[in-house]
Amino acid sequence: MFFSLNIHYSIWAMLAAALIMSLVWIVWYNRRSMKLLKFIKYEERTRRYLYPEDMPSVSVIVFANNDEKWLNKFLPTIMKQNYPAPFEVIVVDDASFDGTKDLVGDMMVYFDHLKIVTVPDQTRSLSRKKLALMLGIKAAQHDVILTTNANCQVKSDRWLMAMMRNMGPGVDVVLGYSHFAHHEDHGIGKNYRTLDEMTTAMQWILSAAKGKPYRGISDNLAYRKQVFFDNKGFSKSLDMKWGDDDIFVSEIATPHNTRLELIPASIATTYYDDLPHAFSILKSRRDFTSHHVKYKAQFRCQAWMSLIYWLRLAVLAAAVALSYTNLAVIIAAVLVLLITWLPMMLATFRNCYLLQLPLLLFSVPLFTLLRPVINTGYKIKGLFTRKNNYTSIM
């Protein structure tokens, strides 16, 4: 092995092309990270919000399906919210056969603003989740709906306050944020799951921040009841089992009637007994429903940048393979990689911190490389399981 700068022009061209692609990629990646930081640290703080005395009355809809354990842990925090206006909590029980009904019944003795609505077990030709939400909304007394799930933990007694402060004149939809309970994820691939959740969250959050909302999370989503009925509920997607959050938000949200809320008090954490399995299921559902949202530019942009990320690596590998005995080429290739990797790791670290996810650093380059490959696997799988996403009324 030797060191020489007398390199063939074709190798120089490869190194230069890889450098340009690296710079393009890292500028794009860091700009997105800075936009998230700017929104959370500056833009969100300077908006006008409702005063406590102007807060609307709220009906919190909690979807439950054999969730006695989670309700016992998390429902009391929702019931004891520090909120200046009237609010009610409606647990919609999807035909649970555990002790969900008894638990909620016992709690109703102590909380007069707690209700329970039961979904008939024999109703199987519709989306169970959508049917449950429709029944809960019809039973709601107040004009604003805030949806969550029994396995979601709100971290503050000011969760309602944080979400509802946005529901001023002209605002019909408030997009809240929820993330997996990653601290309980001890399985293989936990860092990848964190990176994938961060990347997905960055897509819909930044799209909403720039006035193109297309997705919400049913774990933490608010909208006016009248908007729900004006949209005829979930009627446009009744043939689909999923989409009560992203497809529905894509239908009702506009640049002018939607707000995004990300302060710590507004964030929820979602728990699963088997998080890796839940992650896989939810990712497949999200991949299916993503074809039905109105804004798709963020998906195309992510795909192009993933292609650039792979292409630059392939070009560098080719350059090294053609001059593997020249140490100068190897050093140049490593420097080009570091130009991308170091800023990317730091930006990802910051993104995870802002989104309250486990902090990632050294695993980021590898999992960023693998993510489009894994996503392709999900898409191929989706082609064979597509019919499972539809109800029997299709």
Image: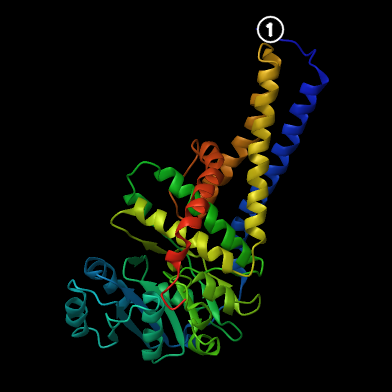
Q: Amino acid at mark 1?
A: Phe
- Residue positioned most to the right: 9
Residue at the spot 60% in from the left edge and 35% down from the top edge: 341
**Along the line of sight, the residue nearer the viewer: 181 or 56:** 181
What is the total number of numbered labels drawn onto the structure image? 1
Residue 366 can be seen, yes or no: yes
- Report x, y in % for residue 179: 43, 59
- Report x, y in % for residue 249: 54, 74
Q: Residues within 10 Å of mark 1 (few under 14, many from 20)?
A: few
- Residue positioned most to the bottom: 141
Coloring applied to the structure = rainbow
Q: Is residue 269 left or right of residue 304?
A: left
Q: Is residue 149 left or right of residue 37?
A: left
Q: Callout 1: helix, strand or loop?
A: loop
Image quadrant assignment for residue 281? bottom left
Residue at the spot 31% in from the left edge and 80% down from the top edge: 92
Image quadrant assignment for residue 257? bottom right
- Report x, y in % for residue 289: 52, 66
Query: In this rendering, is residue 365 above or below 317?
Result: below
Residue 84 can be seen, yes or no: no
Image quadrant assignment for residue 316? top right
**Along the line of sight, the residue nearer the viewer: 208 or 161:** 208
Residue at numbered disc 1: 2
Query: In this rendering, is residue 97 above or below 230?
Result: above
In the rendered image, which quarter contains the N terminus? top right
